[in-house]
Image (tube, grey):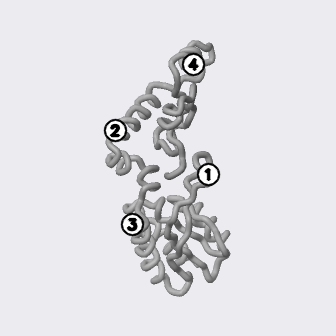
């Protein structure tokens, strides 16, 4: 993601201490991480509170495994879901969107379905203002409000998370894995059959 300084950029710039999350964009377990100059890290480690907030061995093992993935960029993008989603080519997202849309158009006349240009947000905590070009499946129900359709999808098993814009629900295939596409399609068809 262009314009976002990395931890290594902050270290190279001479920052004394850098704090960041182990999950979010890093894609590892939830943990607060501190990187910086030894002098300051030693001060933090010797503070009595350090013992109370240290991570457990399982979290440490998960963090180590995640960081090892980063030793090979291609492997990291393939194996860390967050990176995989952020780095997906627009052409791949569009293929998934068309796959979903084509199968939902067959659901009698209960939905108007189209593939439209949109943007994805990377998340609230990390890079909240960064937008990524995407293709979404826009669904307009002829029988339900967008809010009601969104609620049914959210309460589905498994839950399907979408957003509402201009009276339609939007499904972003960026966050749907290939092996989940038919599950999403069948869930929406199931909802349509009950209308």
Disc 3, disc 4: CB below 8 Å? no
Q: Which residue is mark 2?
A: 71
Position of 185 with respect to 34 (left or right) is: left
> What is the secondary structure assignment of the residue under circle 1?
loop
Is 77 in front, or is 3? 3
Measure the alpha-carbon separation of dots 2 and 4: 26 Å
Please name whichever residue, 74 or 50, is drawn nearer the observer in this view of the structure.
74
Q: Kindly identify which numbered label has been placed on residue 40.
A: 4
Residue 165: x, y in percent?
64, 71
* Residue for badge 1: 128
Q: Nearer the viewer, mark 1 or mark 4?
A: 4
Asked if residue 40 lies left or right of residue 81, the reply is: right
66 with respect to 25 (left or right): left
**Label 2 environment density (alpha carbons within 10 Å; few <14, some 14–19, many ≥20):** few
Give the alpha-carbon distance from disc 1 to disc 2, as whole Å: 27 Å
Q: Residues within 10 Å of mark 1 (few under 14, many from 20)?
A: few
User: Does dot 2 land on a helix, a strand or a loop?
Assistant: loop
First in sequence: mark 1 vs mark 3 = 3
Residue at (39%, 66%) from the top-left corner? 92
The Cα–Cα distance between marks 3 and 4, rounded to whole angstroms, is 45 Å
Q: Which residue is mark 3?
A: 92
Whichever of labels 3 and 4 marks the residue nearer the N terminus, that label is 4
């Amino acid at each position: 993601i262009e314009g976002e300084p990395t931890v290594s950029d902050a270290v190279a710039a001479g920052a004394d201490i850098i704090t960041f999350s182990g999950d979010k964009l890093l894609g590892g377990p939830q943990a607060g991480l501190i990187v910086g100059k030894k002098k300051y890290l030693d001060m933090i480690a010797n503070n009595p509170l350090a013992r109370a907030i240290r991570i457990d061995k399982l979290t440490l093992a998960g963090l180590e495994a995640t960081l090892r993935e980063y030793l090979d960029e291609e492997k990291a993008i393939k194996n860390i879901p967050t990176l995989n989603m952020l780095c997906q080519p627009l052409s791949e997202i569009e293929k998934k969107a068309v796959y979903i849309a084509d199968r939902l158009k067959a659901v009698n006349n209960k939905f108007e379905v189209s593939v439209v240009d949109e943007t994805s947000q990377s998340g609230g905590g990390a890079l909240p203002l960064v937008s990524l070009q995407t293709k979404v499946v826009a669904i307009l129900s002829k029988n339900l409000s967008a809010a009601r359709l969104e609620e049914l999808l959210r309460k589905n098993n498994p839950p399907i998370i979408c957003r509402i814009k201009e009276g339609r629900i939007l499904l972003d295939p960026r966050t749907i894995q290939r092996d989940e596409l038919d599950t999403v399609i069948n869930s929406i068809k199931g909802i349509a059959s009950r209308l």
